[in-house]
């Protein structure tokens, strides 16, 4: 009797495991819904990623404390992102002040292209921690010369054709993404999501991962 009962329980447990132990990926992904956790953009934004790659854009503003708070999460994403992901930071240009900070970002990018001097982080800290005002060319030049660059390097970057091209793309992404606040993450020019939309920074990484996998198929 005991042996029969044990056999029956074993069969029931095996059946239960068969039903619940292996959940298909599509079922796990159902919690992420268009209009709730992300928005599908129409028309899609043209990306700069090579064929076969997925572009992930962080749309931000240096004056935004939420963008600054998101930086550790962005760094976590970068440390574990799939090999087929091309990541870009793009400054939002929703107002004249934001537009100037976009130029600040691009000057920093041109002066520190490989990020060795951590200029991006230092700009964020200058505005968010030190409460410095870098909102004109004189203040910008002073800031970068303190980091070891020359006034001519700053001037050349500001007046370069590269600056005009990058600023035009930043504005285009801001308009076509229909973003009215930051931070915002745009996946492959097709989907927009954000920490405020999904509820937490950890959930944001999960949604971005889901969208990247969706675009990788």
Image: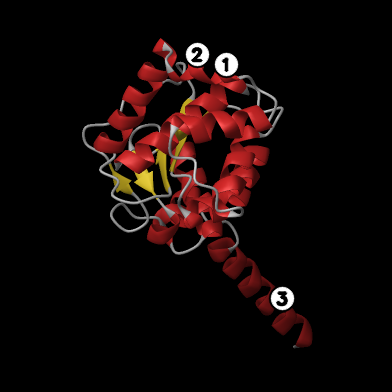
Residue at numbered disc 1: 153
> Could one spot residue 122 in this view of the protein?
yes
Residue 65 x/y as whole percent: 50, 56
Residue furthest out toward the bottom: 1
Secondary structure state at the residue bearing disc 3: helix
Disc ID at residue 156 = 2
Q: Residue at x 39, y 35 (%)?
A: 100
Residue 84 x/y as whole percent: 56, 26
Q: Does residue 36 appear left or right of residue 139 in this picture?
A: left
Pointer 3 and pointer 1: residues touching (CB < 8 Å)? Answer: no
Occupied quadrant, residue 44: top left
Q: In this view, does 39 lie above or below 199?
A: above
Pointer 1 and pointer 2: residues touching (CB < 8 Å)? Answer: yes
Occupied quadrant, residue 98: top left
Q: Is residue 159 above or below residue 209?
A: above
Q: Residue at x 59, y 50 (%)?
A: 73
């Amino acid at each position: 009797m005991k042996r029969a009962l044990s056999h029956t329980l074993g069969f029931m447990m095996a059946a239960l495991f068969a039903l619940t132990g292996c959940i298909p990926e599509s079922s796990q992904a159902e919690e992420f819904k268009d209009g709730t956790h992300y928005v599908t953009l129409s028309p899609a934004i043209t990306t700069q990623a090579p064929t076969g790659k997925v572009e992930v854009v962080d749309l931000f503003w240096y004056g935004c404390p939420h963008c600054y708070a998101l930086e550790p999460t962005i760094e976590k994403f970068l440390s574990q992102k799939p090999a087929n992901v091309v990541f870009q930071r793009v400054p939002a240009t929703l107002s004249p002040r934001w537009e100037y900070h976009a130029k600040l970002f691009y000057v920093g990018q041109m002066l520190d292209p490989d990020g060795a001097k951590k200029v991006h982080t230092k700009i964020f800290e200058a505005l968010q921690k030190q409460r410095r005002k870098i909102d004109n060319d004189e203040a910008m030049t002073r800031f970068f010369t303190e980091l070891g660059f020359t006034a001519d390097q700053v001037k050349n970057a500001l007046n370069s054709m590269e600056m005009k091209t990058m600023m035009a793309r930043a504005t285009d992404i801001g308009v076509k993404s229909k973003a009215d606040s930051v931070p915002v993450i745009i996946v492959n020019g097709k989907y927009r999501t954000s920490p405020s939309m999904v509820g937490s920074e950890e959930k944001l990484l999960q949604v971005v991962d889901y969208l990247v996998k969706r675009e990788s198929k």
